[in-house]
Image: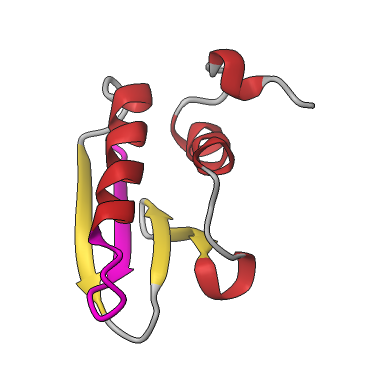
Amino acid sequence: MSHRVQIEYCTQCRWLPRAAWLAQELLTTFEPELTELSLKPGTGGVFVVRVNDEVVWDRREQGFPEPTAVKRLVRDRVAPGKPLGHSDRTA
């Protein structure tokens, strides 16, 4: 099955570096599982992560994501059971 991730970010807020960094983290972790990862410019303070069109993180509701939290949410949708190494350990 093909999996797509989209990170929509606010251009007015200059959040491209944050979105690109998160994209790099996700591609590094899920390269074999993802067929596409896109960055979508937006406005109005948006920072939303979608997997196959399902919103898994919205800054307006959850604040800015820690990469580990997003990796877990993406993993649960694209590679259930895949170990995330040190990211999987809870405090």
Left or right, 4 with respect to 88, comes to left
Q: In the displayed structure, would residue 74 be above or below residue 55?
A: above
**Where is residue 67 shown, x and y percent of the image?**
49, 40
Number of numbered labels in the structure image: 0
Residue 27, magenta (yes or no): no
Q: Is residue 79 left or right of residue 34?
A: right
Asked if residue 7 is among those painted magenta in the image, a careful observer would answer yes
Which residue appears at 30% of the width and 64% of the height? 15
Q: Is residue 12 left or right of residue 53?
A: left
State whether residue 67 is above or below residue 56: above
Residue 87: tell me if it is visible: yes
Report the quarter where the C terminus lies.
top right
Q: Nearer the viewer, residue 58 or 12?
A: 12
Can the viewer see residue 1 in this picture? no
Which quadrant is home to the N terminus?
Answer: top left
- The residue located at (20%, 41%) in the rendering is 36
Looking at the picture, the colour scheme in use is: secondary structure
Residue at figure coordinates x 64%, y 22% from the top left: 88
User: At 44% across and 33% down in the image, what residue appears?
Assistant: 78
Q: Is residue 19 above or below residue 82?
A: below
Q: Residue furthest right?
A: 91
The segment highlighted magenta reads 1-16
Left or right position of 72 against 2 = right
The quadrant in which residue 48 appears is bottom left
Front one among 28 and 1:
28
Residue 41 is drawn in which quadrant?
bottom left
Q: Position of residue 26 (x, y in %)?
A: 36, 34
